[in-house]
Image (cartoon, rainbow, N blue to C red):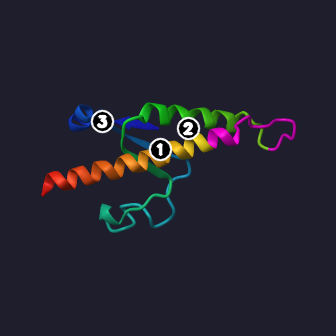
Amino acid sequence: MSISQGPVQRMLGIADLKLESAGGGMPGTDAASAGGHSQFAFNAHVAYFRGIDNAQAIRQLISDRLKLAKDSGLGDHDDTITTTPVGAQAFTAALKELRGQAKALRTAAETCAT
């Protein structure tokens, strides 16, 4: 997981969060396989949250969840993950709020452009 922030993003108080999982890309999905044209590249193991104002909090939440899953023992019946549906509901609500803020920012940007 990495957080990046350009000068304009810093001014606006937002950042980008990049998530990468292990495993690499599927055959034929990288830029080299696409004839060197990066616009055709696709990697199912990378996700971006762009222009968010709580990148650190999302990064920490994902990190905590990964630690819980890693410590669960992968098949040990006596180990349980202690997350609750309430936590999932709060995360879903936060994502919906993020979507609403992104739409408002897009509308504001379009208004300024015209």
Res 19 label = 1
- For the point 26% across and 54% down, the residue is 107
The quarter of the displayed image where residue 73 is located: top right
**Secondary structure under badge 2?**
helix
The amino acid type of the residue labelled 3 equals Gln
Residue stretch rendered in magenta on the structure: 75-88
**Secondary structure under badge 3?**
loop
- For the point 20% across and 56% down, the residue is 110
> Does the CB distance between marks 2 and 1 fall below 8 Å?
yes
- For the point 62% across and 37% down, the residue is 66
x then y, percent, for residue 83: 70, 37
The amino acid type of the residue labelled 2 equals Ile
In the foreground, 79 or 33:
79
The amino acid type of the residue labelled 1 equals Leu
Q: State how far apart marks 2 and 1 are (Cα).
A: 10 Å
Q: Residues within 10 Å of mark 2 (few under 14, many from 20)?
A: some
Residue named by callout 3: 5
x then y, percent, for residue 32: 36, 62
Q: Earlier in the sequence, mark 3 or mark 1?
A: 3
Q: Residues within 10 Å of mark 3 (few under 14, many from 20)?
A: some
Residue named by callout 2: 62
Q: State how far apart marks 3 and 1 are (Cα).
A: 15 Å
Q: Is residue 50 left or right of residue 79?
A: left
In the foreground, 77 or 92:
92
| Up/down of 37 relative to 16, above or below | below
Residue farthest toward the left in the current orientation of the protein: 114
Q: Is residue 36 magenta?
A: no
| Up/down of 73 relative to 50, above or below | above
